[in-house]
Amino acid sequence: MDISVVIPLYNEEESLTELHDWIVRVLHKNGYSYEIIFIDDGSNDKSWEVIQKLHQSNPNVHAARFQRNYGKSAGLNVGFEMSKGNVVITMDADLQDSPEEIPELYKMIHEEGYDLVSGWKKIRHDNTFTKNLPSKLYNSVNRMISGIQLHDMNCGLKSYKSDVIKNIEVYGEMHRYIPVIAKWSGYSKIGEKVVQHQARKYGVSKFGLSRFIYGPLDLLTIMFMSKFGKRPMHFFGVIGSIISFTGLMLLVWLSVDKILFNTTGIANRPAFYLGILMVIVGVQLFIAGFLGELISRNSPERNVYRISEEL
Ligand code: UDP
Ligand code: MG
């Protein structure tokens, strides 16, 4: 099978049939063998009924339905597990992403050998102040921290070599950072394609302002996990050692000063409290490092690596 189109959705009843017909039209025109996988993320409108109808009329439509709303990442993850195509294309269900982009996204993976191609909504039809400007800022911070040169990391329209999605796990709110996750799993050929973007035709946006709080935290988690997840002591141990050593030196200096130069009491000098604090905090960090090591040593995934070729 050439293409799996994975579509996570939450309360998008009005868009689904139109989206399905459009995708099928584009794929037929290009003669691809395909499947369309809808993941109903616990919708409480008629989305599931619509999907059932689509499935009855088109055997290439598959779907899964969550018992409740688990979020876009969980939806994508299930869709990835279900997919059988050589190239997997994800898109939003709200008709903001255009199916006309699919052939080109497919070719970039299949012919040009990209592992992952991310859409770039260069001209964006969303609210300027709540979406467009924050997203620009956000993406430039992401580029700096992750070193991945994408303008629109969180674009819902992306294509993947099937190998990539079978080897990564998307959870929590991590759908925003799939390129980062992919890169850290060893898939470094990441491309970008400018894509058409439409204003939302039906329904409302499902992501509010909370994404500004959780988004950056998730990026920190990913960076930390990919760098130190398997060796927490290298992070906590180094910082802990530096802090407690500095604190210890402060205390030594205070003691020497008192003994040699007979200065008045140590206990009323600010450096004394700073020294004690630093020793305690440093030791705490050290212990956090040890606990981290214990946990990762006992994790069933302590030794995950992927062999890309073998003779
Ligand atoms: N979505 C989902 N689960 C959620 C929230 C959103 O599957 O909990 C889907 C939603 O139905 C849409 C896509 O994720 O297909 C992108 O959401 P939305 O269009 O609301 O985001 P925006 O375009 O406003 O960033
Ligand atoms: Mg949208």
Image (cartoon, rainbow, N blue to C red):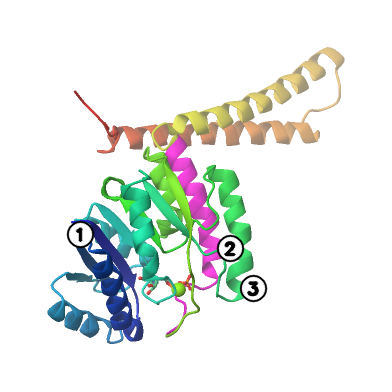
Separation (CA) of disc 1 from disc 3: 37 Å
Q: Callout 3 environment at 10 Å: few (<14), some (14 to 19), or many (20+)?
A: few
Residue with the mark numbered 2 = 135
Expressed as whole percent of the image width and height from the top left, the position of residue 295 reads 34, 37
Span highlighted in magenta in the image: 203-227
Q: Quadrant of residue 3?
A: bottom left
Q: Who is closer to the viewer here, 82 or 116?
A: 116
The verdict on residue 226 being magenta is: yes
Main SS class of the magenta portion in the image: helix
Quarter of the image with the C terminus in it: top left
Disc 2 to disc 1, C-alpha distance: 31 Å
In the rendered structure, find residue 82 and report the number of the disc placed on it: 1
> Taking 134 as reference, is 129 above or below it?
below
Q: Secondary structure at mark 2?
A: helix
Which is nearer the N-term, disc 3 or disc 2? Answer: 3
* 234 in relation to 110, above or below: above
